[in-house]
């Protein structure tokens, strides 16, 4: 199984952890017939990706397609902006204030669980990264996790434990940056 990285361009991208990555291909080289799954990694600050129109247009092009889409941490916000979560239950690590106040996020579809599988989507909160990988592998029919070393979520969480609040000051700061991007 090959893994290829796609991005809006083949320029060097510096990750939040200061890793430098160059995509294998640009979005316009993506042929859905050649892939079984699209994985969106977590994003610490999703604002630049939200306003990269190539990102959103690429994702919009997947609407109605049957490809498995796995998205973790705050990356489901990109799927929401592309309209892919309008009729899909999902979870994410997106702060509650953002989820409630950004108009394209279908707040009523959020399920406060570590992992949610609905239709051809798997979404997860960042701390459930191992289970996210396992669910994605299993959904692809590659069950290398049979020996019991890898299990799903091992405890129940309350909704309160999985609703993340950023507080008024941080939310105002976020919205200021968000509005600055939307103007430009």
Image (tube, grey):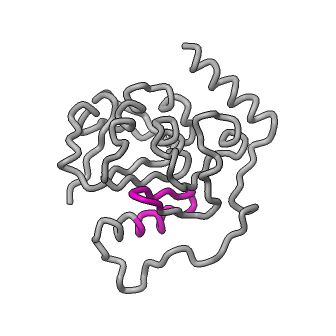
* Residue under the image location 58 percent in, 64 percent down: 114
Task: Work out whether 101 lies above or below 179.
Answer: below
Q: Where is residue 179 in the image (x, y as percent from the top left)?
A: 64, 21
Q: Is residue 49 left or right of residue 147?
A: right
Query: If the image is split into quadrants, where does the N terminus sit?
Result: bottom left
Query: If the image is split into quadrants, where does the C terminus sit?
Result: top right
* In magenta segment, residue 123: yes
Q: Position of residue 169 (x, y in %)?
A: 80, 33
Task: Work out whether 46 lies above or below 1.
Answer: above
Instruction: Please name whichever residue, 96 or 22, is drawn nearer the observer in this view of the structure.
Output: 96
Q: Which residue lies furthest to the right in this view?
A: 168
Instruction: Please name whichever residue, 97 or 177, is drawn nearer the observer in this view of the structure.
Output: 97
Q: Position of residue 86 (x, y in %)?
A: 52, 44
> For the image shown, how many numbered marks are present on the structure?
0
Q: What stretch is highlighted in magenta?
A: 118-135
* Residue under the image location 35 percent in, 67 percent down: 139
Q: In which quarter of the image is residue 103?
A: top right
* Residue under the image location 56 percent in, 42 percent down: 44
Q: Is residue 135 left or right of residue 100?
A: left
Q: In this view, does 175 lie to the left or right of 78?
A: right
Task: Work out whether 149 lies above or below 114.
Answer: below
Q: In this view, does 113 lie to the left or right of 30?
A: right
Q: Residue furthest top?
A: 184
């Amino acid at each position: 199984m090959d893994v290829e990285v796609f991005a809006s361009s083949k320029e060097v991208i510096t990750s939040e952890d200061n890793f430098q990555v160059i995509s294998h291909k640009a979005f316009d080289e993506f042929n859905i017939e050649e892939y079984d799954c699209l994985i969106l990694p977590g994003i610490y600050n999703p604002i630049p990706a939200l306003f990269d129109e190539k990102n959103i247009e690429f994702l919009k092009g997947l609407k109605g397609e049957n490809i498995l889409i796995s998205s973790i941490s705050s990356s489901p916000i990109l799927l929401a902006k592309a309209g892919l979560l309008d009729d899909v239950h999902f979870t994410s690590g997106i702060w509650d204030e953002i989820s409630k106040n950004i108009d394209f996020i279908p707040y009523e579809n959020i399920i406060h669980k570590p992992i949610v599988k609905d239709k051809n989507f798997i979404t997860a909160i960042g701390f459930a990264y191992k289970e996210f990988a396992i669910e994605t592998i299993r959904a692809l029919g590659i069950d290398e996790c049979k020996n019991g070393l890898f299990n799903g979520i091992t405890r129940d969480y309350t909704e309160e434990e999985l609703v993340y609040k950023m507080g008024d000051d941080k939310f105002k700061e976020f919205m200021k940056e968000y509005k600055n991007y939307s103007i430009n």
